[in-house]
Amino acid sequence: MKNFIVKTLANAGALLVAIWLIKDITLTGDSTWHKTLTLILVALVFGVVNWLVKPVVKVLSFPLFILTLGLITLVVNALMLLLTSWLADKLSLNFHVEGFWTAVVGGLIISIVSWALHVVLPDDE
């Protein structure tokens, strides 16, 4: 359970940095409390998408991983961020990513920040 909370907080922090740095990734709300709750819920959605969908996409695109020497990871991360944005819209969460290239840059930022946070934050493993 502790590991789940740590990963969710790391995802929320990484998403927050991407929202802060990129103007086309938006999180809106009436108050700070509402924005914080929305960010945590979006981080949960992002975690579920990365847990369920990303492994399937990686297996299906394995030849592209070999062909591009792993650079297709940027595209896969962007697609996961766009899927999270779409699901957030369906769940009435005020999170939006505007366009594919914004998602590519956002995915790169989220990957770097989340890796750094996972190094710093405690882990059960």
Image (cartoon, rainbow, N blue to C red):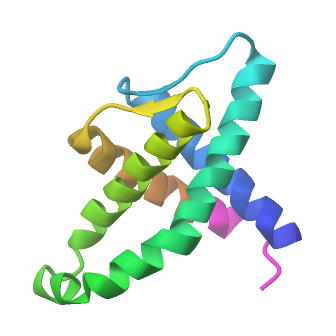
On the image, the x and y values in percent for residue 38 come to: 69, 32
On the image, the x and y values in percent for residue 7 come to: 71, 63
Q: Residue 63's quadrant in the figure?
A: bottom left
Q: Residue 3's quadrant in the figure?
A: bottom right
For image coordinates 50% across by 28% down, the residue present is 20
Tell which residue pokes out farthest to the top in this image.
30
For image coordinates 70% across by 43% down, the residue present is 41
Q: In which quarter of the image is the N terminus?
A: bottom right
> How many labels, in total?
0
For image coordinates 73% across by 52% down, the residue present is 9
For image coordinates 28% across by 50% down, the residue present is 104
Residue 118 in the magenta stretch? The answer is yes
Q: Residue 103's quadrant in the figure?
A: top left
- The range drawn in magenta is 116-125
Tell which residue pokes out farthest to the left in this image.
67
Quick one: 65 or 80, which is closer to the camera? Answer: 80
**33 relative to 108, above or below:** above
Res 121 visible: no
